[in-house]
Image: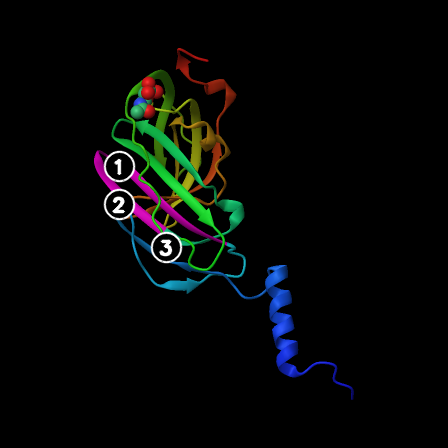
Amino acid sequence: MRTCMKPQTFLLASALLCTLLGLGYPLSCEVCTGSGLTCSGNVQTCDPDQDSCVVTVAETSRKGHWSVNTYKGCMKSSACRSDFLSITMDPENYAVSNTRCCQGDACNRDPVPAPQNNRTENGLQCPTCIAHFKETCSSTQQVPCVGKESRCAAFTGKVQTGIIFATQGCATENACHTKPGTLVPSASRIYTITRANCPSDTQPSGKAK
Ligand SMILES: *[C@@H]1O[C@H](CO)[C@@H](O)[C@H](O)[C@H]1NC(C)=O
């Protein structure tokens, strides 16, 4: 048998090829959740289909309980968007977050800046509702939008425990295109948004654009 390469050379060549093609050699990311503007945890190997590391910092108010929380972990790039997000259901229930996605081992170590939490009303209003164990909710009330929130949005999501919820309120434009799987860490739980849309029949009233 003719060997054209030494085994070591062959292994090295395969490793290079795999790296170039993005195959095998799974990504590793720092994984943690915690209160505050950053958290630290172990660097863990991601599932093969998780090709991004994520760090997200969220300032949330849930039933008036305000908190800042950080989540770091592995994600699919298709569910990860580096962006600022602002969602308001009512003055006691809202979330603002900053997210950064990156590709590279432990690239999510560095914190992201705290999201700007501008609660100044901007003159727009949207229908609002919150319901658990449901995929949709209907609204009888309006909420004033704040800061950069320019759209009325409806979300379906789930809490870690698997409990689904539906909500409507004001949101930044990018929330209308929220990728399924977007995470919003809150005090004792992490919310996953599984569906988002901005129905055109419920666009903000007020000094509309
Ligand atoms: C906060 O939001 C209001 C309403 O949209 C806006 O007029 C104001 O400039 C914002 N403040 C900052 C610091 O961005």
- Of tags 3 and 1, the one toward the viewer is 3
Numbered circle sitting on residue 109? 3
Number of the label disc, if any, that sits on residue 187 = 2
Question: What is the x, y in percent for residue 198?
Answer: 48, 26
Compared with 53, 63 (above or below) is: above
Q: Position of residue 84 (x, y in %)?
A: 40, 35
Residue at the image point whose x is 37% and y is 16% from the top: 124
- Residue 101 in percent (x, y) is at 45, 47
- Asked which quadrant contains residue 119, the reply is top left
Q: Position of residue 58 (x, y in %)?
A: 32, 41
Q: SS class of the residue under badge 3? A: loop
The relative height of residue 171 versus residue 46 in the rendered view (above or below) is: above
Determine the image quadrant of residue 19.
bottom right
Q: Which residues are drawn in magenta? A: 52-71
Image region (quadrant) for ligand 1: top left
Say which residue appears at 33% left-offset and 28% top-offset: 89
Sequence-earlier tag: 1 or 2: 1
Numbered circle sitting on residue 62: 1
- The residue under the point 41% across, 37% down is 134
Q: Distance between the Cα atoms at labels 3 and 1? A: 27 Å
Q: Name the residue type under label 2.
A: Ala
